[in-house]
Amino acid sequence: MIMGVLIAGPTASGKSHLAMRLAERLGGTIVNADSMQVYRDLRVLTARPGAADEAALPHRLYGHVDGAAAYSVARWLGEAADAIAAVRAEGRVPIVVGGTGLYLAALTQGLSTMPPVPDEVRTRWRAAQATHDAPALHAMLVARDPEMAARLRPSDPQRIVRALEVVDATGRSLAAWQAQKSPPVLPVRPGVPAYVVAPPRDLLRRRIAERFALMVEEGGAGEAAALAARALDPALPVMKAIGVAELAAAARGEMSLEAAAAAAVTATRQYAKRQDTWFRHRFAGWQRLAPGEMPALP
């Protein structure tokens, strides 16, 4: 008996199409696991399901968050747990699909409980990051938290500073906090098959370029300009969606639309490569599928 289905894959891989086919076959409801498709501001640039798809099959956790919200994996996990329970209560099968590896890992493996870091501690270490290079920060971490320092590259200042913030604020290693995980909501097990849609690299690169061109045709530049006009904090997750900065710059006349699209396509290809690396390492036991391939369900 199928209790749920998990589908991962890099952007433009065809995972949403597979989710639709499986939902039709199983009587399923599609549950979003993409950190950018939660935002209502960005239907086009995040390739959210269209109105016809949403009318054909039930979808959950798409476009329900305002861009001003600092949405997090913890918030998504709580909402996903509620959505999965509601889908099952309706007698349907949850089909969880997305390209955000951290969301899917939290869902299937549990989420580490991270402590709050006081603003003054965060400010102090962000100031240190501005005045010290990465090796110097790493040396500080070696002195304060050698266990975590051994896990991090000396060239990764963001993660080093995060580890320094946590040990400073709590007196405990970030490694100790990461070891404390909540129970998984939907672990991979018999009855919960897990798939990674994995196109050949050349095909994926072509799909990314073609899809971004279609996004521009369907109003992606206007969508980016409208979001930029809200003057939100640039540190918010929504402002980091690929294509927003590039197309907003084109709308302001700072670069041509062609140059903006080319930059966004390059950034998307780089992101897809990082996604594929994550899935290969973290989801090595998930069945890999070619685009369009329909799995033989257990």
Image: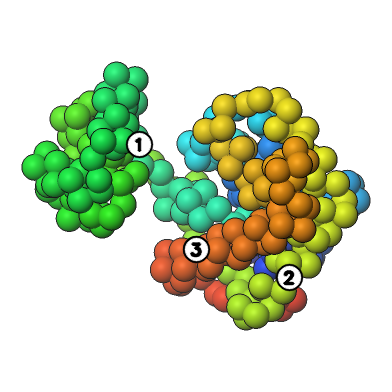
The answer to whether residue 231 of the structure is visible from this angle is yes
Q: Which residue is drawn at 34% across and 44% down?
A: 158
Q: Quadrant of residue 4?
A: bottom right
The residue tagged 1 is: 113
- Left-right relation of 126 to 107: left
Looking at the image, which is closer to me, 220 or 284? 220
The residue tagged 3 is: 274
10 Å crowding of disc 2: few (<14), some (14-19), many (20+): some
In three-dimensional space, the C-alpha distance between marks 3 and 2, rounded to whole angstroms, equals 17 Å
Percent coordinates x, y for residue 89 in the rendering: 69, 41
Q: Residue at x 67, y 48 (%)?
A: 246
Percent coordinates x, y for residue 196 in the rendering: 58, 69
Quadrant housing the C terminus: bottom right
The answer to whether residue 28 of the structure is visible from this angle is no
The residue tagged 2 is: 207
Q: Quadrant of residue 42?
A: top right
In three-dimensional space, the C-alpha distance between marks 1 and 2, rounded to whole angstroms, equals 37 Å
Looking at the image, which is closer to me, 126 or 67? 126
In three-dimensional space, the C-alpha distance between marks 3 and 1, rounded to whole angstroms, equals 25 Å
Q: In which quarter of the image is residue 239?
A: top right
| Amino acid type, label 1 | Thr
* Nearest to viewer (mark 1 / mark 2): 2
Q: What element carries label 1?
A: loop
Q: Sequence order check: which comes first, mark 1 or mark 2? A: 1
Q: Sequence order check: which comes first, mark 3 or mark 1? A: 1
Q: What element carries label 3?
A: helix
